[in-house]
Amino acid sequence: MAEGRYPKVTTDPSTAPDQRGVPASPRFPELEQRVLAYWAEDGTFQASIDQRDPGENGSNEFVFYDGPPFANGLPHYGHLLTGYVKDIVPRYQTMRGKRVERRFGWDTHGLPAELEAMRQLDIKTTDEIHEMGIDVFNDACRTSVMKYADVWQDYVTRQARWVDFEHDYKTLNPDYMESVIWAFKTMFDKGLIYEGFRVLPYCWNDETPLSNHELRMDDDVYKPRQDPAVTVGYDVTSAGTIDGVDFTGKKLLIWTTTPWTLPSNLAVMVGTEIDYVSVTAPDGNDYVLAEARVSAYKKELFPEADEPTVTWRGKGADLLGLTYDPPFTYYRGHENAFRVVAADDAVTTDSGVGLVHTAGAFGEVDKEVTDREGIEPVMPVGKDGKFTHPVEAYVGLQVFDANKPIIQDLKNVSGPVTPGTVLLRQESYEHSYPHCWRCRQPLIYKGVSSWFVEVTAFKARMAELNQQIRWVPEHIKDGQFGKWIDNARDWSITRNRFWGSPVPVWKSDNPEYPRIDVYGSFEEIERDFGTLPLNKDGEKDLHRPWVDNLTRPNPDDPTGQSTMRRVEDVLDVWFDSGSMSFAQNHVPFEHNEWFEHHFPGDFIVEYIGQTRGWFYTLHILATALFDKPAFSSCVSHGIVLGSDGNKMSKSLRNYPDVSEVFDRDGADAMRWFLMSSPILRGGNLVVTEQGIRDSVRQVMIPLWNSWYFFQLYANAAQLEAEASTASRDPLDLYILAKLRAYVAEMTEAMDLYYVADACEATQRFLDVLTNWYIRRSRERFWNEEQDAFNTLYTVLETVCRVTGPLLPLTTEEVWRGLTGGRSVHLADWPSVDDLPADDDLVARMDAVRDVCSATSALRKARKLRNRLPLAGLTVVGADVTGFEEIIGDEVNVKGVRLLDAEADEAKSYGVEQRLTVNARAAGPRLGKNVQQAIKGSKSGDWTAVVAPDGTVAVTAGGLALEEGEYTLETVAGAADDASAVGMLPSGAFVVLDTVVTPELAAEGLARDLVRAVQQARKDAGFQVEDRISLTIAGTPTVQQAARTHEHLIAQETLATSYAVVDAVESAGDVSEVSVGEGDKATIAVVLAD
RNA sequence: GCGCCUAUAGCUCAGACGGUUAGAGCACCACACUGAUAAUGUGGGGGUCGGAGGUUCAAGUCCUCCUAGGCGCACCA
């Protein structure tokens, strides 16, 4: 390695060792690929973990739980976004000295995997699965589920996310599954798991019930749907009378959008406080309905009359106990059924008729009411959603398909319809209806047997433990997540499917000798069955069908006839992923000591929807099993939207292609774009190509240019820089103090997971670095000041470290080029204590920048171009002591004077006073007159008279103002021809001498020439240190200025030979330029020998 | 459907308790500057503060209604 040459190390093959230097404009995606290759070869990731000691009992570990994705397609921006956070936080913690293991996880079980397998096998029904054999089917699931694993790994690697794929965990591993059944059993033993019959949303196509969080996984689940709605009259059979009115033969009207549930009708619900009437219709029947609904049925009930013929009027409570003939004959005689029952919560008169048809097993409320009334539910619908015995007329018909014949039979009172039943109205009704989030088929509500976690029994504890979790954004804790817990219902955890962790329950097949065994380990299973569940390769395997094959005689059956058989269900996949915190390490069978010290985990991050998904199930299981939260802090970010502000959609192609962005803009640019957005604080983010390119421009290029600048001059000077804060130069001290503040900001932001704040701080710091420090220090680098190089080296090296997690690839190349070290990601996070603080200096330098801004504005206003030197600038009332030279240089004036604001001279610069009325103070006293005072203060119609005793009497618009009702300030007034006055935000002001003498004009012209020559040098492709031969021709004014300022021009342009002539004849690069006040000049540059 | 939140420049968002001329960043235009910079500096255009009423000396800010969007809950037979 050549001493004093940069880059010290590079991945760029185009940079030969003897010809160092970095490209001014690198192609970032290519640079990234080279850094990735370097990491792979170097083993940097592993080294970053290995170099950190886990500490006693892992006290020095930072525990990150990687939520397992279900890889059923290519990763999209949402996954990448989460992935970037999952990378940034561990990188940061590693630099802070922690050991951070990062195991990738795969969610492998469940319906999505089965559906994919069914698609590949081209089968549609569960019967076909049974036919081919569960083992064959599950093999297909196992294969299909890892189909995208390689692509995922490619994407994750390309995004520069450091993850351990080698020691990944999969929910299908026997160890993982053993932990899962352990969890089931432990909760069962605690009495937190029960088997029940519950009405659940049920997908007849996938043949599985959906848990309530699955139901809402997707926003499109509720979609408008057209259903037939029928109004049916049931024939009252009770002989009794109400209020002396005989109800026998009257018709109880009900309204339903699910005619297919009518054969299963068991009761009619009314609201006890609702007013009901009995109305005689033209068809001769008396119909009972809510009074409020009568007018909605005018056509049927009183088409010709103004008023209905009311034969009875009363409350719902009066109707209770009425009995009726069910609309279909199948369940006639069903115990306790076919009565009018009360359900005040469920019955409204907003729609329908105010009496509600009740089919016990097909509605949640229905089930609740029939349970209360002691009515056994009936279930004439099979798992495939088709009618079964005893509803013989429609057997084999899917329920939605059965609507039609059912309505037909009702209309004709034919088939199984009970005589006396009336179809009063038939209509089409559009309503919002739930659909399966997987297959998009309309769901039905159906009573099914399922196992439940009794979340309601410990949700109060979940709410308490939630208080121990730090949420980003904060409001999730008591908002979305807290509220979801408060409304938690029992969790249906079983699925009547094939590919999943088994429900570890064996039941006796003879109800006369009941017995239930629950198993929580391979060992327990082996003990009772004498063998492990083994698959066809002889490996232990808890999947179906192997686990189903284990049976044994029922020990509680003296006859020895009955057998213990496993219940066929598998567990909800969310039970798998919710077990991740312990199951990934096979707890409690292994690593218990480790688990003791690493639970709860330190950090998780996923999108906000996981508040009812993974965050929720992790929390349920952690609470139930360990009485602790599963994680101590959680970032839940917003949703990534397409470029049109809508959800990203493949078919709409409303987002940039991920791999194209990697290839064109790079992974760091995408990382920056996603991480600097409000999405990590809960907002949503619209992905646009422009936004990604802006990150390159606003951050990566400035960073790279600073590095390019450094190496350009360091190499030109052949010097070696070192980390040092020893410089006493004010600019150096300023940037180091700024750096210190920046490091402090970064540390705080990263500790709080406010990644977007860290990005913003970085952008602000880079602006100060490039647009002030480097620009103002250029000459010092040209003059080879070691202090300047050391300072810039220190700044760049430190910036690389603190932005390492945010731009891991770019900073790696820069940092290694700068230091020659192995990796910035193996370095320690910088400490503010290593950097000097100087608040006073920072304040003064910020004032300097204000002075320069104000002066530039004056030049602009007076049309005095910057290259034209001016005689002087007076700064009044701003402390910029010690920076006169910098100001003079920056705004191109010969002299800078500082004046105290109180100095007599300061008062001579046309300074005025301005009166501002404080409306808040004066308003209440003056009332409407305050407007007059305000007007006066603005128009100049005001006075301020100082009395001999020093008090001030102020009037505005003719109204006297009291102390505190106004503010009187000094502002710069109008200037004259010879000077211009400009205000600073602080109230200080600057006075610029605007007189242009011939001498100044000539010097300005000379500087125009310098600029033109520099441009010509650049156009000719000369190196910065190349010497030239320079010839200048032009008007007499030009020639005179060129002669007067020969020294300046020659020195600035590195001209070793210099000539001013009437006409340029030389060879070389000749250019015509306009200089000064419209003078023409011709310049020629030739490389000097 | 019920509840909560939001609506300010082309885009993303600030605008305690009502207070006078509604700001910032990005984007756009002009000029300036440039021996690292695909940068930068200065200035400018751009807003009936979602709409309509009301309270007040004074409303982007408070109240009512409406409209649009988001989120949560429920699913209604």
Image: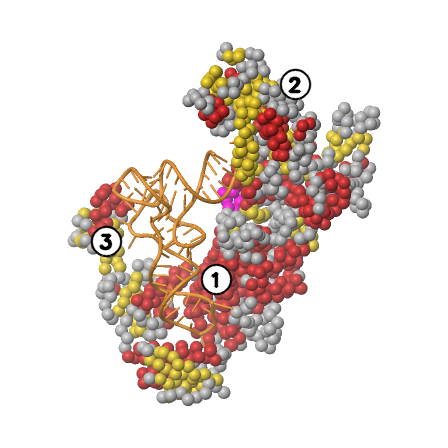
In what element is the residue under mark 3? helix
Q: Is residue B19 left or right of residue A933?
A: right
Residue at far top of view: A244
Mark 2, residue position: A333
Mark 1, residue position: A698
Q: CA distance from mark 2 to mark 3?
A: 92 Å
In what element is the residue under mark 2? loop
In what element is the residue under mark 1? helix
Residue A777 in the image: state x and y as whole percent: 44, 70
Disc 1: host chain: A
Point 42% across, 80% down: residue: A1013
Instruction: Please say which color scheme the image uses.
Output: secondary structure
Judge whether A885 appears above or below A754 on screen.
below
Q: CA distance from mark 1 to mark 3?
A: 42 Å
Looking at the image, tell me whether mark 1 or mark 3 is earlier in sequence order.
1
Residue A441 in the image: state x and y as whole percent: 61, 40
Residue A46, quarter of picture: bottom right
Mark 3, residue position: A938
Do discs 1 and 3 share a chain?
Answer: yes
Badge 3 amino acid: Lys
Residue A193: tell me if it is visible.
Answer: no
Residue A1084, quarter of picture: bottom left
Disc 2: host chain: A
Looking at the image, tell me whether mark 1 or mark 2 is earlier in sequence order.
2
Point 48% across, 22% down: residue: A301
Circle on res. A73: none
Bin the neighbour count of mark 1 within 10 Å (Cα to Cα): few under 14, some 14-19, many 20 and up.
few
Residue A711 forms part of the magenta stretch: no
Disc 3: host chain: A
Residue range corresponding to the magenta coloring: A469-476
Residue situated in front as seen by the camera: A310 or A602 = A310
